[in-house]
Amino acid sequence: MKKMWAGRADGNTSRVADDFNSSISFDKRLFREDIRGSMAHALMLAACRIITDAEAEALVTGLSAILADMEEGILSPSPDCEDIHMFVEQVLTERCGDVGKKLHTARSRNDQVALDMRLYLLSETDGIKEGVKGLISAIVTKAEEYKDAVCPGYTHLQRAQPITFGHHLMAYAYMFLRDIERLKDCRKRTDVSPIGSCALAGTTYKTDRAFEAEKLGLSQVCENSIDGVSDRDFCVELLSCLSIFMMHLSRLCEEIILWSSWEFGFVELSDAFTTGSSIMPQKKNPDMAELARGKTGRVYGDLTTLLTVLKGLPLAYNKDMQEDKECVFDACDTVKACLSVLTPMILDMRAKTDNMRKAAGKGFINATDLADYLVSLGLPFRDAYKISGSVVAHCIKTGETLETLPLDAYKTFCDRIEKGVYKAVDLDTCVSKRISFGGTAVSSVEAQIKSVKEKLK
């Protein structure tokens, strides 16, 4: 097939070169954005009297028919075409005649593909943002259900202090809220029109780039035509946001995997989101969480791919930039797939509150509260800390806990200790007294839940 760029050369390349050069196998998903951009371009050409109103109407009508046919599956991109831009233009010319050849006036595939990618990623960003909001809502629902369920809090994966399961879950709600903020901020720099930059130097035609941007719903126009065709920062920034999101999601999945093990026994995932073993009938595997954890590396790889592609490119457009699409598409698809399965998985997750409570009763996670009790008796914190550590060491030797250690034994470490020590080290007291802003007290967790719900609105 003769290429639309045939002229200086005869346009006849080998089949191997065609296959290597072609991008239609993956950029065909941009057909909606490509046609939408072409419609706006036709209207701009008419508004600037570069083509007639009748010609613009014929182009828009023809493009609308192509869009409808592609949406319905009547028309499919031809693998013989180099890219989606060439396919749309070729079909348009076949259907509308010579007027179809006028559409590409005052633009290039360089600014055309930059526009398509921006329009596509604006839509993807909005969709992913809504998906993350759904995930946060699921987490908040579970946090509300278990806002008073006492469990051990960890540092270094060692039992540290008593918290509530709702408090722990809300930490992830705030992580994902930051991801939404990053996506919103990234969107601002994607919402820029490069069309009219042409190949790199602009055009000799008197065009109206602001008119075209307005027709496309874009709020800004890039101010340098070279930057307009060579900028892929918006792609890098989105992949960075998605990588951070996947890092947060992977941390949550790691904890769910741990919590659902026999060793922890803190949660049970529903049968709908677990798998079994081909030879071990007792197994209930958290495969969905494991897959999401694994797919995090895939999204990281997409970001690294794009950064590597761009790092040595001179201005302006280079064919290397065709490699932006598959990694961007893959990252968006991967994130959406993870959201689609993990959100309902979390909603179906059941906490084993009795097991959590039993675990919280071991490991002396109320030792800090014993120290705080001693401080309330007038001891300096460092002295209180040392006494508490000595009490813990004694309990480990005798098999006691801070709740069961006799008062006489307590007094051997500090004669100021009275019966009030037992209330001070009670797990419910330990949790309820942590009323500082953002803390684990039920009232504090309720305030966090209310705050996140307001932010989601």
Image (spheres, rainbow, N blue to C red):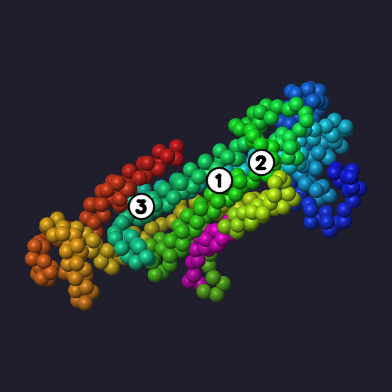
Return the x and y of residue 443 as percentages of the image width and height. 28, 46
Q: Secondary structure at mark 3?
A: helix
Q: Is residue 142 left or right of residue 398?
A: right
- Mark 3 residue type: Gly
Up/down of 205 relative to 318, above or below = above
Which residue appears farthest toward the left when viewing the image? 415
Query: Disc 1 versus disc 2: distance between alpha carbons?
Result: 27 Å
- Which amino acid, by three-letter code, is at mark 2? Asp
Which amino acid type is marked by label 1? Answer: Ile
Span colored in magenta: 281-299
Which residue appears at 75% of the width and 40% of the height?
Answer: 199
Mark drawn on residue 128: 1
User: Is 279 on the left-hand or right-hand side of 51?
Assistant: left
* Residue at the front extreme of this rendering: 314
Which quadrant holds residue 164? bottom left
Nearer to us in this view, 255 or 346: 255
Observer-side mark, 1 or 3, equals: 1
Give 413 or 171, whichever is nearer the viewer: 413
Residue 197 point in image, percent of width and height: 71, 36
Q: Which residue is mark 3?
A: 166
Residue 227 got which mark? 2
> Residue at the spot x=79%, y=35% of the render?
104
